[in-house]
Amino acid sequence: MKLTIRDLKGNERGELEVKFPLVEDPKKGRQAVHDYVVGFLSWRRAGTACTKTMGEVAGTGKKPWRQKGTGRARAGSFASPLWRGGGVTFGPKPRDFSKKVIRGVRRLAFRKAMTERLNAGDVIIVEDFAMPTHKTRDFVQVMRALQLEGTVMLVGKGMDTNLLAASHNVPKVEHVSSETLNAYHVLKCDRLVFSREAYEQVEQRLNMS
């Protein structure tokens, strides 16, 4: 498989041969992708939600009123979960949501995700991300020249400062480093735009799997 290299004006600047092993079997790697995405989203959960139980609520341990003779329901504590300001029954506590995903599954998921996006024609290679200005309108012109629609993921090896500034206010455009790109990032957006240097680095990572 060959990919066309373009400049920021959409002009062709050559071709690039895909050198990592594609996942040819359509059924292979599906479960790996699912497991990785579930694991990745679980790693991002803070797990810091915390509520106080009846024993942790600040307040006196005095009985609100005597047991009998008042005509009111029995009450033994101001911290009762039935009362406003009382403890929470079975409320959330800080916990670790992370799931272990073994290295072989992570690598297979990455190769499977890249294979699917390449086969779908959603990967675009540009010679360089360097922009002459930091103006948003110039980046919008780049998007039009490259025919980018929907959500876009820009993958670079050290992003150009002008590019970051110009695309900052453009909705549905995200950035990620070629060193941290993973299966979740690959699948998240409609189009993937790599700089040539970034794509070559990603290929090196894929060839290690």
Image (spheres, rainbow, N blue to C red):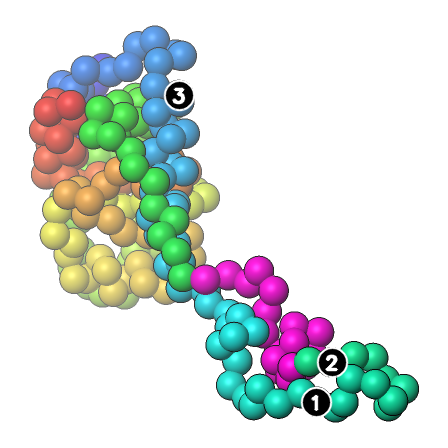
Residue designated by label 3:
30
Q: Residue at x 51, y 85 (%)?
A: 58
User: CB atoms at circles 1 and 2 under 8 Å apart?
Assistant: yes
The image shows residue 121, relative to residue 131, as above or below, that is above
Q: Secondary structure at mark 1?
A: loop
Q: Residue 196 location, x and y as percent?
A: 13, 36
Badge 3 local density, few (<14 within 10 Å), some, or many (20+)? few
Q: Residue 31 location, x and y as percent?
A: 40, 22
Regarding residue 127, the answer to whether it shows in the image is no
User: CB atoms at circles 3 and 2 under 8 Å apart?
Assistant: no
Q: Quadrant of the N terminus?
A: top left
Where is residue 75, by image quadrant?
bottom right
The one of 132 and 26 positioned closer to us in this rendering: 26
CA gap between label 1 and label 2 equals 6 Å
Relative to 141, 5 lies left or right:
left
The image shows residue 99, relative to residue 14, as above or below, that is below
Q: Residue at x 31, y 59 (%)?
A: 167
**Dominant secondary structure of the residues highlighted in magenta in the image:** loop
Question: Does label 1 or label 2 sit earlier along the sequence?
Answer: 1
Question: Which labelled disc corresponds to residue 5?
Answer: none
Residue designated by label 2:
75
Residue designated by label 1:
64
CA gap between label 3 and label 2 equals 56 Å
Residue bounds of the magenta highlight: 77-93
Q: Residue at x 52, y 80 (%)?
A: 57
Question: Does label 1 or label 3 sit earlier along the sequence?
Answer: 3
Amino acid at dot 3: Arg
Whether residue 181 is in magenta: the answer is no
Badge 1 local density, few (<14 within 10 Å), some, or many (20+)? few
Q: Residue 56 location, x and y as percent?
A: 49, 77
Question: Does label 3 or label 2 sit earlier along the sequence?
Answer: 3
Q: Secondary structure at mark 3?
A: helix
